[in-house]
Image: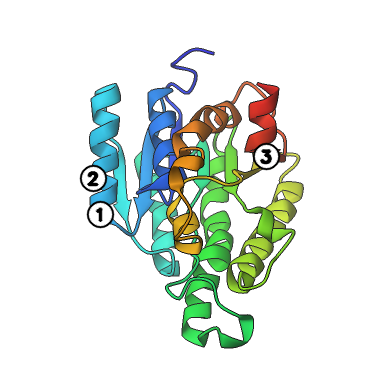
Amino acid sequence: MSDLSLSNRIALVVGASRGIGYETALALAKAGAQVVATARTQGGLEALDDAIFAATGRHATLVPFDLVDGGGIDRLGGALYERFGRLDIWVQSAATLGASGLTPVSHADPREFAKVEKTNFTAVYRLIRSLEPLLRASDAGRALYLTSSLAASPRAFWGMYAATKAGAEALFKAWADEIESTPIRCSIIDPGRMRTAIRAQAYPGEDPETLPHPSEIGPLMVDLARGDRTPPLAVAFREWTAAS
């Protein structure tokens, strides 16, 4: 696969300031894509831009905003249309465990639950609504959603996170079925145990050096984003790695 396999492709990475989103944005840029990076943290986005420029000589387009801002998501679609006229790749990496972390369902704070729901679930609906016309304008739109095994197999204390990820995954699958006759193809990726901030928040005593670094998923994300192949709807990082 050429290092320029994504040359001239427009790639939006939501949740790009750290972890899997950061490393995916960097990998896509190295593969030739023009990256549009969004996140709440301006500093993290600027660090990403520095890394992209050092690796490629090009800058990313940085869009700092919070996913709880539904109007901001709508404006993002309009801004992308005015700037590029289309979108070739959408990576949905952003998610939150909530400030309180793991908690029994009966103890969840309603305001915190609402924020987790807006970030992990409602934002996915708003992004689909905002970005579908742009992806339809591409000759081979690709939408990549990062999920968790907890969406299918929830465990104690993970209720808020598991429920909202399950809802978003169901929404994404339904959308994939609705647009089957278009050039857009969707993939749902389970990264498994990985060295991320959410993982560290949930397991503060775990040694992060025993986990795969988020950069290891970069080649898979680039592969799924390519327009010259038909990606599978569901992919597990560990299975893809074993098959590679």
Q: Residue at x 62, y 87 (%)?
A: 106
**Residue 37 visible here:** yes
Where is mark 3, residue-wise? 236
Judging depth in this view, the residue of 142 and 196 nearest the camera is 196
| Residue at position x 47%, y 71% in the image | 98
The CA span between labels 3 and 1 is 30 Å
Residue 34 location, quadrant: top left
Q: Give residue 36's position: percent from left, percent from top.
A: 37, 42
Residue to which mark 1 is pinned: 42
Badge 2 element: helix
Image: 45 above or below 71:
above
Label 2, label 1: how far apart the Cα atoms are: 6 Å
Which tag is nearer the camera, tag 3 or tag 2? 3
Tell whether 11 sits left or right of 173. left
Badge 1 local density, few (<14 within 10 Å), some, or many (20+)?
Answer: some
Q: Which residue is mark 2?
A: 46
Q: Identity of the amino acid at label 1?
A: Gln
